[in-house]
Image (cartoon, rainbow, N blue to C red):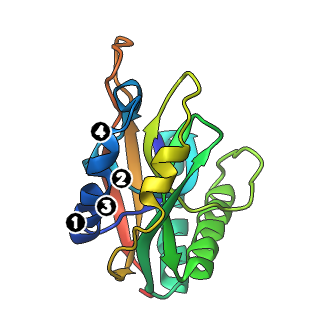
Amino acid sequence: MRLFAAVLPPEPAAAELAAAVRPLHALPGADGLRWTERAGWHFTLAFYGEVADRLLPELHARLARAARRHPPHELRLAGGGRFADRALWAGVAGDRTALRRLADSAVAGARRAGLALDEHHPYRPHLTLARTRTPVNLRPYVAGLADFEGEPWTAAELSLVRSNLPGGGEPGRQPRYETVAAWPLGG
Protein backbone atom coordinates (compact mmCIF):
# COMPACT_ATOMS: atom_id res chain seq x y z
CA MET A 1 0.00 0.00 0.00
CA ARG A 2 1.47 3.40 -1.03
CA LEU A 3 1.14 5.72 1.99
CA PHE A 4 2.01 9.13 3.33
CA ALA A 5 1.29 11.15 6.47
CA ALA A 6 -0.48 14.47 5.94
CA VAL A 7 -2.42 17.38 7.32
CA LEU A 8 -5.57 18.00 5.30
CA PRO A 9 -6.95 21.55 5.03
CA PRO A 10 -10.64 21.85 5.92
CA GLU A 11 -13.19 22.41 3.18
CA PRO A 12 -13.62 26.17 3.80
CA ALA A 13 -9.86 26.68 3.42
CA ALA A 14 -9.83 24.58 0.24
CA ALA A 15 -12.74 26.64 -1.13
CA GLU A 16 -10.82 29.88 -0.51
CA LEU A 17 -7.78 28.49 -2.28
CA ALA A 18 -9.87 27.21 -5.19
CA ALA A 19 -11.28 30.72 -5.68
CA ALA A 20 -7.74 32.15 -5.70
CA VAL A 21 -6.51 29.51 -8.16
CA ARG A 22 -9.42 29.81 -10.60
CA PRO A 23 -8.03 32.94 -12.38
CA LEU A 24 -4.69 31.16 -12.88
CA HIS A 25 -6.39 28.73 -15.26
CA ALA A 26 -6.80 31.64 -17.72
CA LEU A 27 -3.08 32.46 -17.85
CA PRO A 28 -1.12 31.59 -21.00
CA GLY A 29 0.09 28.00 -20.87
CA ALA A 30 -2.32 26.93 -18.11
CA ASP A 31 -3.81 24.24 -20.34
CA GLY A 32 -0.37 22.58 -20.45
CA LEU A 33 -0.26 22.14 -16.68
CA ARG A 34 -1.61 19.10 -14.85
CA TRP A 35 -3.74 20.74 -12.17
CA THR A 36 -4.26 18.77 -8.99
CA GLU A 37 -7.78 18.03 -7.87
CA ARG A 38 -9.16 19.94 -4.92
CA ALA A 39 -10.28 16.70 -3.25
CA GLY A 40 -6.64 15.63 -3.06
CA TRP A 41 -5.14 18.82 -1.64
CA HIS A 42 -2.95 18.12 1.38
CA PHE A 43 0.28 18.99 3.17
CA THR A 44 2.48 15.92 3.01
CA LEU A 45 4.34 15.47 6.29
CA ALA A 46 6.21 12.28 5.37
CA PHE A 47 6.10 10.11 2.26
CA TYR A 48 6.39 6.40 3.04
CA GLY A 49 5.98 4.79 -0.37
CA GLU A 50 4.99 1.13 -0.46
CA VAL A 51 4.35 -0.14 3.06
CA ALA A 52 4.06 -3.87 3.79
CA ASP A 53 0.84 -4.91 5.56
CA ARG A 54 2.85 -6.45 8.40
CA LEU A 55 4.23 -2.99 9.31
CA LEU A 56 0.85 -1.25 9.45
CA PRO A 57 -0.06 -1.99 13.09
CA GLU A 58 3.23 -0.57 14.37
CA LEU A 59 3.03 2.41 11.99
CA HIS A 60 -0.49 3.17 13.26
CA ALA A 61 0.70 2.95 16.88
CA ARG A 62 3.67 5.24 16.20
CA LEU A 63 1.58 7.83 14.36
CA ALA A 64 -1.07 7.78 17.09
CA ARG A 65 1.68 8.46 19.64
CA ALA A 66 3.12 11.26 17.48
CA ALA A 67 -0.31 12.90 17.16
CA ARG A 68 -0.83 12.82 20.94
CA ARG A 69 2.49 14.59 21.48
CA HIS A 70 1.65 17.57 19.26
CA PRO A 71 -1.07 20.09 20.06
CA PRO A 72 -3.51 21.43 17.48
CA HIS A 73 -2.12 24.55 15.84
CA GLU A 74 -3.32 27.40 13.71
CA LEU A 75 -2.49 27.56 10.01
CA ARG A 76 -3.76 29.39 6.96
CA LEU A 77 -3.14 28.92 3.27
CA ALA A 78 -1.10 31.83 1.97
CA GLY A 79 0.89 32.80 -1.10
CA GLY A 80 2.52 30.39 -3.46
CA GLY A 81 5.75 29.28 -4.99
CA ARG A 82 7.33 26.87 -7.41
CA PHE A 83 9.85 24.09 -7.56
CA ALA A 84 11.94 25.15 -10.56
CA ASP A 85 9.45 25.39 -13.42
CA ARG A 86 7.95 21.95 -12.81
CA ALA A 87 5.54 22.38 -9.88
CA LEU A 88 3.32 25.19 -8.62
CA TRP A 89 2.29 25.20 -4.98
CA ALA A 90 0.34 27.13 -2.37
CA GLY A 91 2.09 28.01 0.83
CA VAL A 92 1.13 27.98 4.46
CA ALA A 93 1.38 30.60 7.19
CA GLY A 94 0.76 30.38 10.90
CA ASP A 95 2.49 27.95 13.21
CA ARG A 96 4.89 26.46 10.66
CA THR A 97 7.21 25.35 13.47
CA ALA A 98 4.50 23.10 14.90
CA LEU A 99 3.83 21.70 11.42
CA ARG A 100 7.55 20.98 10.92
CA ARG A 101 7.77 19.24 14.28
CA LEU A 102 4.77 17.11 13.41
CA ALA A 103 6.45 16.19 10.11
CA ASP A 104 9.65 15.24 11.94
CA SER A 105 7.64 13.01 14.29
CA ALA A 106 5.84 11.36 11.35
CA VAL A 107 9.23 10.49 9.84
CA ALA A 108 10.73 9.30 13.13
CA GLY A 109 7.67 7.19 13.94
CA ALA A 110 7.82 5.48 10.57
CA ARG A 111 11.49 4.66 11.00
CA ARG A 112 10.78 3.21 14.46
CA ALA A 113 7.98 1.16 12.92
CA GLY A 114 10.52 -0.43 10.59
CA LEU A 115 10.01 1.55 7.38
CA ALA A 116 13.14 2.20 5.35
CA LEU A 117 12.82 5.83 4.32
CA ASP A 118 14.96 7.89 1.99
CA GLU A 119 17.17 10.54 3.52
CA HIS A 120 15.04 13.08 5.36
CA HIS A 121 15.32 16.62 3.96
CA PRO A 122 14.31 19.77 5.80
CA TYR A 123 10.53 20.07 5.74
CA ARG A 124 9.12 22.60 3.25
CA PRO A 125 5.35 22.75 3.74
CA HIS A 126 3.47 23.23 0.50
CA LEU A 127 0.24 22.16 -1.18
CA THR A 128 0.84 21.15 -4.81
CA LEU A 129 -1.51 22.86 -7.26
CA ALA A 130 -0.06 21.91 -10.66
CA ARG A 131 2.78 19.97 -12.24
CA THR A 132 4.34 19.77 -15.65
CA ARG A 133 6.77 17.37 -17.27
CA THR A 134 8.24 20.07 -19.47
CA PRO A 135 9.47 23.34 -17.97
CA VAL A 136 6.90 26.14 -17.98
CA ASN A 137 7.44 29.69 -16.77
CA LEU A 138 5.53 29.49 -13.49
CA ARG A 139 6.46 33.00 -12.33
CA PRO A 140 3.12 34.54 -13.46
CA TYR A 141 1.26 31.85 -11.53
CA VAL A 142 3.30 32.50 -8.38
CA ALA A 143 2.65 36.24 -8.82
CA GLY A 144 -1.07 35.49 -9.08
CA LEU A 145 -0.95 33.88 -5.64
CA ALA A 146 1.35 36.45 -4.01
CA ASP A 147 -1.43 38.35 -2.24
CA PHE A 148 -3.55 35.32 -1.35
CA GLU A 149 -4.07 34.81 2.35
CA GLY A 150 -6.82 32.52 3.56
CA GLU A 151 -8.64 32.55 6.86
CA PRO A 152 -6.96 30.81 9.82
CA TRP A 153 -7.95 27.22 10.57
CA THR A 154 -6.87 24.69 13.15
CA ALA A 155 -4.77 21.70 12.13
CA ALA A 156 -6.34 19.21 14.52
CA GLU A 157 -5.38 15.77 13.19
CA LEU A 158 -2.65 13.71 11.61
CA SER A 159 -3.86 11.60 8.70
CA LEU A 160 -2.43 8.49 7.10
CA VAL A 161 -3.34 8.64 3.43
CA ARG A 162 -3.25 5.99 0.74
CA SER A 163 -2.25 7.06 -2.75
CA ASN A 164 -3.98 5.03 -5.45
CA LEU A 165 -2.04 5.60 -8.64
CA PRO A 166 -3.94 5.65 -11.92
CA GLY A 167 -3.55 2.50 -13.98
CA GLY A 168 -2.81 2.08 -17.63
CA GLY A 169 -0.63 5.16 -17.99
CA GLU A 170 -3.52 7.29 -19.21
CA PRO A 171 -2.36 10.90 -19.65
CA GLY A 172 -4.04 13.40 -17.37
CA ARG A 173 -5.30 10.90 -14.80
CA GLN A 174 -4.49 11.75 -11.23
CA PRO A 175 -3.88 9.64 -8.15
CA ARG A 176 -6.87 9.15 -5.87
CA TYR A 177 -6.24 9.71 -2.19
CA GLU A 178 -8.08 8.03 0.64
CA THR A 179 -7.58 8.60 4.34
CA VAL A 180 -7.03 5.19 5.94
CA ALA A 181 -6.58 6.45 9.53
CA ALA A 182 -6.50 9.75 11.41
CA TRP A 183 -5.52 10.71 14.93
CA PRO A 184 -6.44 13.87 16.83
CA LEU A 185 -3.55 16.13 17.71
CA GLY A 186 -3.04 16.49 21.41
CA GLY A 187 -4.82 13.19 21.94
Q: Distance between the residues labelled 2 and 3?
A: 10 Å
Q: Are marks 2 and 3 in contact (CB under 8 Å)?
A: yes
Residue hosting label 1: 11
Q: Are marks 2 and 4 in contact (CB under 8 Å)?
A: no
- Find residue 41 and name its label: 2
- Find residue 42 and name its label: none
> Disc 4 on helix, strand or loop?
helix
User: Which of the two labelled residues, at mark 2 and mark 3, occupies the earlier sequence position?
Assistant: 3
**Marks 1 and 3: which is nearer the front?**
3
Residue hosting label 4: 26
**Marks 4 and 1: which is nearer the front?**
4
Q: Choose between 65 and 152: the one closer to the eye.
A: 152
User: Which of the two labelled residues, at mark 4 and mark 3, occupies the earlier sequence position?
Assistant: 3
User: Which of the two labelled residues, at mark 2 and mark 4, occupies the earlier sequence position?
Assistant: 4
> Disc 3 on helix, strand or loop?
helix
Left or right of 68 in this view: 37: left
Query: Which three-letter amino acid code belongs to the residue tagged 1?
Result: Glu
Q: Choose between 75 and 99: the one closer to the eye.
A: 75
Q: How many marks?
A: 4
Q: How far apart are marks 2 and 4 (CA)?
A: 21 Å
Query: Which three-letter amino acid code belongs to the residue tagged 4?
Result: Ala
Residue hosting label 3: 17
